[in-house]
Image (cartoon, helix red, strand yellow):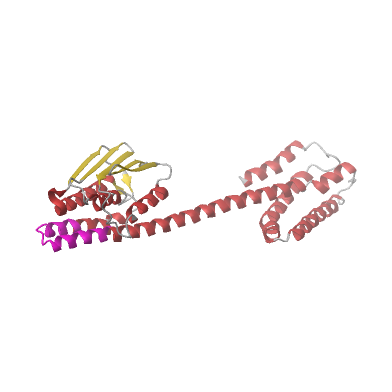
Amino acid sequence: MHLLVWALLIGIPAIVIQQGPYLGLPPYFFPITAVYHAGIFYLNAFFLYPQLLTKKFWWLYIISLAVVVLLSFHIKLYFLQLIPGFHLTPENRGVIAFGLIPFLVASIIFRLINDRIRYERLEKEARSEKLASELKFLRSQVSPHFLFNMMTNMVSLARQKSDMLEPSLIRLSELLRYMLYESQEDRIPVADEITHIKNYVDLQKLRFGDDVNATLNISNESQNNLIEPMLLIPFIENAFKHGIGLQQHPYIFISLTIKDKELQFRVSNNYSKDNLSKDKNSGIGLVNVKNRLKLLYPGKYELTITDEKGEFLIQLNLNLS
């Protein structure tokens, strides 16, 4: 683009002013001075402006521009006076003296725009680095939090000397394999996340048996979608952790529907308001997934959490594009 602009600024005067002197100036004066002005343009853009103005030496910068303009006038005048028959007139004096000014103004504007673009690029890179750091931190929370809940379940089965302990450990090993390997990717197939959800629900059914009515309905019509790993499981964890309490008939209903690029996820469970067994770490999973949604899917999700009449309901609509 620079080459094109300078080619036009040098070429057009050379073509238009070729019949003879203009304002007493020879035709070749204009393309030659355009080349000279190009040098001053870059001198100001990449040396004077960044070295003086941006370092608060504005007074020295103004003096430097004045010196450049004055020196340019005398340099042009010196070479013009070598041409036989040249006469300095009020008309060509202005062209010689102030012809550089538009190029200096354009140079300053160019530098301002260039600095703005560079600043926005650096800001974008900083935001990307911050996003990556936040996601890395949030992901580092998911696995320990999940493992903590699972180990609590295993301890409960061990205390009961339950026959479900061995199959539960097998299910747990499958979940841990998923967490250690597949969940390290930026995005994974939705089908893998669904398999993880099924394993988790089966593990909880092994623990609670018929004591809880857990229903899982999944409809995945689009097999090529990708999703952030372990994004949905904290909602289900929350339902099992706090939905199994003092109520007589606990239930957990989980529905996941994926059509085209739209994911609709719903988790509901009843609970007893007399159950105050939440520990001090309660809610880590939900806070974590809310933060990840904000970072990864801004403007592409709608999360609704309601708590009414002893039922906790989570509804998530997510665009996977």
Specify whether 138 is left or right of 93.
left
Q: Residue at x 79, y 58 (%)?
A: 63
Q: Residue furthest front?
A: 274
- Image vertical order of residue 68 relative to residue 212, above or below: below
Specify whether 34 is left or right of 288.
right
* Camera-nearest residue between 177 and 44: 177
The quadrant of the picture occupied by the N terminus is: top right
Q: Position of residue 98 (x, y in %)?
A: 81, 47
* Camera-nearest residue between 148 and 49: 148
Query: Magenta stretch: residue 16 in it?
Result: no
Q: Position of residue 64 (x, y in %)?
A: 77, 58
- Image vertical order of residue 226 relative to residue 68, above or below: above
Residue 221, quarter of picture: top left
- Image vertical order of residue 165 relative to residue 260, above or below: below
* Camera-nearest residue between 64 and 259: 259
Q: Position of residue 164 (x, y in %)?
A: 11, 57
Specify whether 98 is left or right of 146.
right
The quadrant of the picture occupied by the C terminus is: top left
Residue 55, quarter of picture: bottom right
Residue 144, quarter of picture: bottom left
Q: Which residues are magenta?
A: 146-172
Query: Magenta stretch: residue 168 in it?
Result: yes
Q: Residue at x 60, y 50 (%)?
A: 116
Q: Residue furthest left?
A: 163
